[in-house]
Image (cartoon, helix red, strand yellow):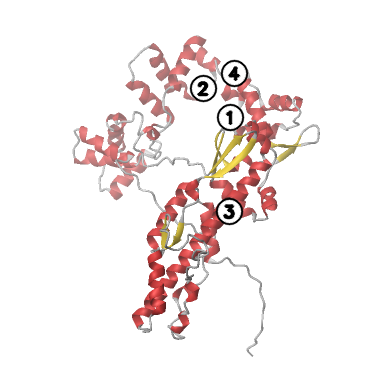
């Protein structure tokens, strides 16, 4: 028997407009300008700049000015008069099947010659037969952005046979690699590991005693050199500490990632544009939003005139129905976008203003030890917004301060108790740890255990494993690898 039942569920779903607003809030200044440009191109009802004095006032509620001009709004038109019941506007039937994680993926295209194309162009300077050219091009195509070939030669031989129909041997591939690819610019590309890349770079330099010794050390004692076993190196090669220091200096001048040195590499370096600016005026903090985040937008005067004409028309033809329907869609979209930009501006300012006052002492002095423990929830509670909104502002926005341009999320940190029982920011502890390591005797660098003791003496009871964690977060190596001669 078929049983019927009624079940109630409470679901919370975001509308497409809410999702788009969150995406706008997340965008930094440059990306926001691109989004703005795209919207203006796609919606002819949206206009930029100041209007003429007799046009509609630039108001986010789509009203005319207060001098008595007629207000024309998209809602003033009764679309139902023009459309029958089976002609439901498409935008009213769209399913709410968007996800907050659905981000538009725009692939940037770099102009000019790419890294790999530059390498291939250089192959034309060598005399190669058809098979050698094919092998060389295949090897160049196997180089990663750092400049290395990470795959085994036997795998490359197999791929040449299956994908390029070139049947060859490991010996021939290695010969092309060493005689051709290793002679391409930038120097050191095509190496199979760091050791080989450094040796290639040294061999291109003018030969002298220290460079010959450097090649010998890298070739025969690479692990000892990397691990800084200086005493063993001195004994193995029968050299003085001064000579070893010169070798260390010579090798340190080499590029461990030769591919990244190519100026035309297809990875585009993004220029940082501060979204906010904080200045100190008369001893007080002054916050401003980058003006590029506050464009002048209004409803197109031409569209309003078209709308007025259709509204006053007595003939309701099919073409007029379509035109009115199209105009209403564009006006609704323009009205929402203008309102969304205002909400974005308010959200950014309110959030950053709260962060600024929370970290007032830091912004006034620039001393990172004055940073207070602050998590996303602290700001979200004060501005009465969701934590995800604060996260969107903090993760992608920069602020210009008297002490440099900073990523906003860097001002957030967890808290720990000092020996006085007071909450201190982990940022403060990391700064002190960094200072202690910077000032240590590099001939006898401090171990994590000794660093823990020093910080405890300074009033921060930190365990050795916590010191290790903070040191790794600061990208500082262990004591043995910090040793210098």
Q: Position of residue 241 (x, y in %)?
A: 52, 10
Q: Number of marks in the image? A: 4
Does label 3 or label 4 sit earlier along the sequence? Answer: 3
- Mark 2 and mark 1: span between their CA atoms? 20 Å
Question: Which of the pair 114/148 is nearer the observer?
Answer: 114
Mark number, residue 346? 3
Residue occupying the far bottom of the picture = 1
Residue occupying the far right of the picture = 420
Does label 3 or label 2 sit earlier along the sequence? Answer: 2
Does label 4 or label 2 sit earlier along the sequence? Answer: 2
Along the horizontal axis of the image, is 141 left or right of 234?
Answer: left
Q: Quadrant of residue 155?
A: top left
Question: Which of the pair 89/307 is nearer the observer?
Answer: 307
Mark 3 element type: helix
Mark number, residue 476? 1
Q: Of discs 3 and 1, which sits in the foreground?
A: 3
Q: Which residue is mark 4?
A: 442
Mark 4 element type: loop
Mark 1 element type: loop
Mark number, residue 224? 2
Quadrant where the image shows the N terminus: bottom right
- Residue pictured at 45% horizontal, 77% vertical: 89
Q: Is residue 226 above or below residue 259?
A: above
- Label 3: how many Cα within 10 Å (few below 14, some 14–19, many 20+): some
Q: Of discs 2 and 1, which sits in the foreground?
A: 1
Q: Position of residue 157 (x, y in %)?
A: 32, 42
Does label 2 or label 1 sit earlier along the sequence? Answer: 2
- Mark 4 and mark 1: span between their CA atoms? 13 Å
Residue 105 appears in the figure: no
């Amino acid at each position: 028997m078929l049983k019927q039942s009624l079940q109630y569920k409470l679901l919370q779903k975001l509308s497409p407009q809410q999702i788009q607003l969150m995406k706008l809030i997340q965008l930094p200044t440059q990306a926001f300008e691109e989004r703005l440009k795209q919207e203006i191109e796609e919606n002819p009802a949206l206009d930029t700049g100041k209007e003429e004095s007799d046009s509609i006032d630039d108001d986010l509620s789509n009203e005319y000015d207060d001098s008595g001009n007629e207000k024309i709004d998209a809602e003033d038109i009764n679309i139902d008069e023009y459309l029958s019941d089976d002609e439901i506007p498409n935008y009213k039937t769209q399913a709410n099947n968007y996800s907050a994680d659905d981000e538009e993926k725009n692939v940037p295209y770099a102009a000019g010659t790419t890294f790999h194309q530059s390498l291939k162009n250089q192959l034309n300077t060598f005399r190669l037969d058809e098979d050698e050219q094919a092998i060389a091009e295949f090897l160049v195509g196997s180089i990663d952005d750092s400049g290395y070939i990470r795959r085994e030669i036997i795998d490359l031989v197999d791929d040449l046979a299956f994908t390029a129909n070139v049947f060859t041997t490991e010996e021939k591939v290695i010969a092309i690699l060493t005689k051709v690819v290793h002679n391409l610019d930038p120097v050191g590309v095509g190496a199979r590991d760091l050791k080989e890349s450094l040796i290639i770079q040294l061999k291109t330099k003018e030969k002298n005693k220290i460079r010959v010794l450097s090649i010998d050390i890298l070739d025969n004692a690479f692990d000892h050199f990397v691990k800084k076993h200086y005493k063993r190196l001195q004994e193995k090669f029968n050299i003085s500490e001064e000579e070893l220091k010169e070798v260390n200096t010579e090798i340190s001048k080499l590029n461990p990632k030769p591919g990244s040195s190519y100026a035309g590499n297809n990875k585009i370096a993004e220029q940082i544009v501060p979204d906010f600016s904080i200045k100190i005026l008369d001893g007080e903090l002054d916050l401003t939003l980058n003006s590029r985040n506050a464009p002048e937008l209004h409803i197109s005067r031409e569209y309003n005139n078209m709308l007025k004409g259709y509204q006053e028309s007595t003939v309701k033809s099919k073409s007029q129905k379509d035109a009115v329907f199209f105009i209403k869609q564009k006006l609704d979209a323009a009205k929402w976008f203008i309102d969304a930009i205002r909400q974005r501006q308010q959200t950014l300012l309110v959030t950053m203003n709260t962060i600024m006052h929370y970290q007032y002492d830091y912004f006034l002095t620039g001393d990172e030890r004055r940073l207070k423990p602050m998590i996303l929830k602290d700001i979200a509670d004060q501005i009465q917004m969701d934590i995800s909104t604060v996260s969107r502002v903090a993760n992608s926005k920069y602020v210009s301060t008297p002490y440099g341009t900073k990523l906003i999320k860097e001002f957030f940190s967890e808290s720990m108790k000092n020996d006085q029982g007071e909450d201190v920011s982990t940022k403060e502890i990391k700064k002190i740890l960094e200072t202690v390591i910077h000032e240590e005797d590099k001939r006898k660098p401090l171990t994590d255990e000794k660093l823990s003791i020093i910080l405890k003496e300074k009033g921060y009871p930190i365990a050795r494993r916590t010191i290790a964690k903070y040191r790794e977060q600061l990208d500082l190596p262990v004591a043995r690898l910090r040793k210098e001669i």
